Amino acid sequence: MKEYLEAGIIVNTHGVHGDIKMKNYCDSPDALASIKTLYVKKEGEYFPMSCTKSVPVGRDMQLVHFKNCDSFEEAIKLKGVCVYAKREDIPISEGSCFIADIIGLPVIDSTSGQVYGVVSDVFNQGAQDIYEVQKKDGKTGLIPAVSQFINKIDIESGVYVTLIEGLL
């Protein structure tokens, strides 16, 4: 499992004192705001950046200020940069798992054991997450991540599903 997980992407500057506007990839704005050290990746290495301020702005945006980034000129250099958080620093509820751990898992019928394919992506269209499944025939299908279809997620063995006809 990855030690560092994508937490967001810096989309712009905010003001002239080094604040940045970041798209939040975490489940909630408060989850990202609670992380005191984020990381940027350069040439395969992760470098820490201490957050001195992290304020939610709407559902998926954050205003962030990093220590030693005190001017517009310093902040603009970060535009477009993906930021990461250490796995152990991200708050997660009991029984939950990270999206990064789901991608690549086989999608298995809970009753028959038939493998439909693998989870190739997870995205959200507002109401709930959607699992994109790369099927064995090369086509893709979509499964809403709701209890009617997703029975169990075991990061060791797969995503266990009960599907209705035509869903996949």
Image (cartoon, rainbow, N blue to C red):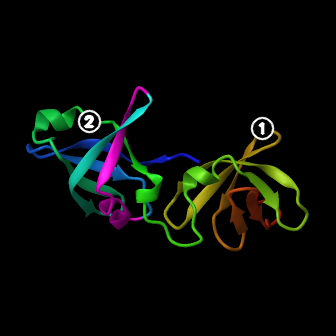
The amino acid at mark 1 is Gly
> Which of the two residues, 69 or 141, is positioned nearer the viewer here?
69
> Upstream in the sequence, badge 2 or badge 1?
2
Residue 38 falls inside the magenta stretch: yes
Q: With respect to residue 166, does 74 lie above or below?
A: above
Quadrant for residue 72, please give it.
Answer: top left
Which percent across, then down, holds residue 164?
A: 80, 67
CA gap between label 2 and label 1 equals 37 Å
> Which of the two residues, 80 or 46, is positioned nearer the viewer here?
46
Q: Which residue is the site of mark 2?
A: 78
Residue at x-position 8% and y-position 43%: 16
Mark 2 surroundings within 10 Å by alpha-carbon count, few (fewer than 14), some (14 through 19), many (20 or more): some
Secondary structure of residue under mark 1: loop
Q: Which residue is the site of mark 1?
A: 138
Residue 79 falls inside the magenta stretch: no
Badge number at residue 146? none
Q: Is residue 17 left or right of residue 87?
A: left
